[in-house]
Amino acid sequence: MTDHARGHSSATLSEASGLPIALSPDIRSLWAGARLCGPAFTVQGAGGDNLALHHAVLHAPAGSVLVADLGGARFGHWGEVLAVAARHRGIAGLLIDGGVRDAAELETLGFPVFSRNNSILGTRKDFRGVLGLPIRVGGVTVETGDLIVGDVDGVVAVPGSDVHRILQRADDRVAREQELIAELKQGRTTLELFGLEAAGR
């Protein structure tokens, strides 16, 4: 998978952006070590109904991350069967404000999923959903084409129009942190390096 984020973590991108791009910490990786990275393809569904996700798998471009608003509903909207279908079509992963199931199977597949909850409750298939329009996920508005990055610390949605600027700021931030780490290893303190001694803190 192409690393659209240049290897930067969700935390680094959040801090470098200066924008409210971090999703609610209630949305977490379904299995340890999962990582999302790719352009969003948005899905507006309905809680307790997963027909929209079936349509999204069919229409999302290869390499994209499905980003779905299911209203945080505690149903198993996504599981092994949809993950196999998505993997076959080259979809990079799923970010869902709602529930999923089949955690062990999805880990075995290596298919990254970030969700608000896990649930074995079944779903109906009545609402076709709306694809490609702005949605709210984890308290953040996400548009198709935004850069989604998810890791052990959380998830960010970087606005597509601002990706280059934020990645450059993230590069600069990482370089500065490496300088700080080198100085700490030489015996300097965080109070010195952050100017906290002079401020009397």
Image (cartoon, rainbow, N blue to C red):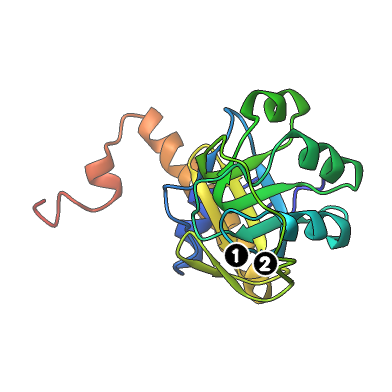
Q: Quadrant of residue 148?
A: bottom right
- Measured from the top left, where is residue 119 in percent x and y? 53, 37
Mark 1 touches mark 2? (CB < 8 Å): yes
Please name the residue that numbered disc 2 is placed on.
146
What secondary structure is found at the residue carrying circle 2?
loop
**Pick the front one: 154 or 95:** 95
Number of on-image labels: 2
Residue count near mark 1 (Cα–Cα under 10 Å), binned few <14, some 14–19, many ≥20: many
What secondary structure is found at the residue carrying circle 1?
strand
First of labels 1, 2 by sequence position: 2
Q: Quadrant of residue 15?
A: bottom left
Rendered residue at 24%/45% (across/down): 192
**Pick the front one: 174 or 19:** 19
171 on left or right of 94:
left
**Pick the front one: 198 or 31:** 31
- Identified by mark 2, the residue type is Asp
**Pick the front one: 172 or 179:** 172
* 140 w.r.t. 4: above or below: below
- Measured from the top left, where is residue 64 in percent x and y? 79, 56
- Measured from the top left, where is residue 50 in percent x and y? 69, 53
69 on left or right of 88:
left
- Identified by mark 1, the residue type is Val
Residue count near mark 2 (Cα–Cα under 10 Å), binned few <14, some 14–19, many ≥20: many
Please name the residue that numbered disc 1 is placed on.
158
- Measured from the top left, where is residue 43 in percent x and y? 69, 64
Q: Is residue 156 visible?
A: yes
Q: Quadrant of residue 171?
A: bottom right
Of all residues, the one furthest to the right in this rendering is 88
Position of the N terminus, as image quadrant, is top right
Rendered residue at 67%/67% (across/down): 146
Rendered residue at 28%/41% (across/down): 190
